[in-house]
């Protein structure tokens, strides 16, 4: 299996780059010579991350809150204004609110979190596909979760909104992979349960582990598309 090992000069958009998996991924790609645009929803936190990431390589911060319906279009416009092509779209930003079950969640959470965890990813792909088609072996990675697999939905009913949005993201990945087959590789990533804002302090893994798994999925042969990966290991949706 021929792996990609040279990220020098690659143009990469990472959503949710101010913390966790996105931040750790940005460090790796910048150190390899890539150009990175990274979004964050909190200005202070993004400024802090940018101060460190800019010492590693060419990093451009972009404020974006994907709870805002206007955010994906604004991000796409900013990318197009800066670059005439795009090699990687890493849809990493997401939200999670832990509740024990549907009754505990009520009716509003699913509607609100679908926007950040599914609709934003879809719109970014839709709006940036023309730049990706101009890229070199372009790829899209949708960051999902082991909590959003079919098997997980069958056996666990806690945090139902998060599980359902990630399960739906798997379907989105499959549909876009078929739409863009032969032009853009589209895959989903389970980064593992990590000590991030989403994963919490008791998770067994570190954010850097997620960054490494992002590196691994981005290093896969371009012909791999429409699949779900734990790093470079294929898993079931």
Image (spheres, rainbow, N blue to C red):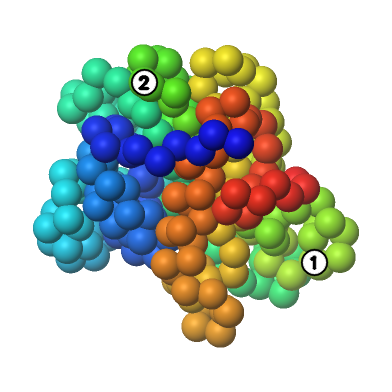
Residue 11: image quadrant is top left
Kindly identify which residue carries mark 1.
157
Give neighbour class at mark 2: few <14, some 14-19, many 20+ (Cα, 10 Å).
Answer: some
Label 1–label 2 contact, CB within 8 A: no
At a point 43% along the width and 31% down the height, the residue shown is: 124
Identify the mark at residue 234; answer none if there is no mark. none
**Left of 111 or right of it: where is 26?**
left
- For the view shown, which residue lies furthest in the front direction? 1
Q: Position of residue 60 (x, y in %)?
A: 18, 44
Q: Where is residue 71 in the image (x, y as percent from the top left)?
A: 35, 38
Q: Disc 1 or 2, which lies upstream in sequence? A: 2
Question: Could you tell me which secondary element the residue under label 2 belongs to?
Answer: loop
Question: Could you tell me which secondary element the residue under label 1 belongs to?
Answer: loop
At a point 53% along the width and 45% down the height, the residue shown is: 217
**Left of 13 or right of it: where is 155?**
right
Give the vertical position of 57 relative to 46 (above or below).
above
- For the view shown, which residue lies furthest in the bottom direction? 202
Give neighbour class at mark 1: few <14, some 14-19, many 20+ (Cα, 10 Å).
Answer: some
Residue 178: image quadrant is top right
Front-lying residue, 220 or 228: 220
Q: Which dot, 1 or 2, sits closer to the camera?
A: 2
Number of numbered callouts drawn: 2
Identify the mark at residue 135; answer none if there is no mark. 2
At a point 75% along the width and 64% down the height, the residue shown is: 102
Q: Where is residue 46 in the image (x, y as percent from the top left)?
A: 23, 59
State the separation of the CA atoms marked 1 and 2: 41 Å
Residue 93 seen: yes
């Amino acid at each position: 299996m021929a792996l990609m090992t040279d990220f020098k000069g690659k143009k990469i958009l990472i959503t949710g780059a101010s913390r966790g998996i996105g931040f750790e991924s940005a460090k790796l790609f910048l150190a390899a010579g890539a150009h990175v645009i990274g979004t964050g929803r909190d200005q202070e936190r993004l400024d802090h991350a940018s101060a460190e990431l800019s010492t590693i390589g060419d990093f451009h911060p972009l404020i974006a809150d994907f709870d805002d319906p206007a955010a994906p279009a604004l991000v796409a416009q900013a990318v197009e204004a800066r670059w005439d092509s795009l090699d990687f779209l890493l849809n990493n930003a997401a939200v999670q609110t832990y509740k024990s079950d549907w009754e505990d969640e009520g009716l509003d959470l699913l509607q609100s979190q679908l926007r950040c965890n599914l609709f934003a990813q879809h719109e970014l792909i839709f709006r940036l596909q023309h730049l990706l088609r101009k890229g070199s072996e372009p790829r899209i990675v949708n960051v999902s979760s082991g909590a959003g697999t079919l098997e997980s939905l069958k056996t666990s009913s806690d945090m139902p909104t998060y599980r359902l949005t990630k399960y739906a993201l798997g379907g989105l990945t499959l549909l876009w992979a078929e739409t863009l087959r032969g032009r853009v590789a589209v895959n989903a990533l389970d980064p593992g349960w990590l000590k991030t804002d989403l994963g919490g302090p008791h998770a067994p893994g570190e954010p850097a582990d997620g960054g490494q798994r992002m590196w691994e999925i981005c290093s896969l042969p371009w012909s791999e598309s429409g699949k779900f990966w734990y790093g470079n290991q294929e898993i079931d949706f």
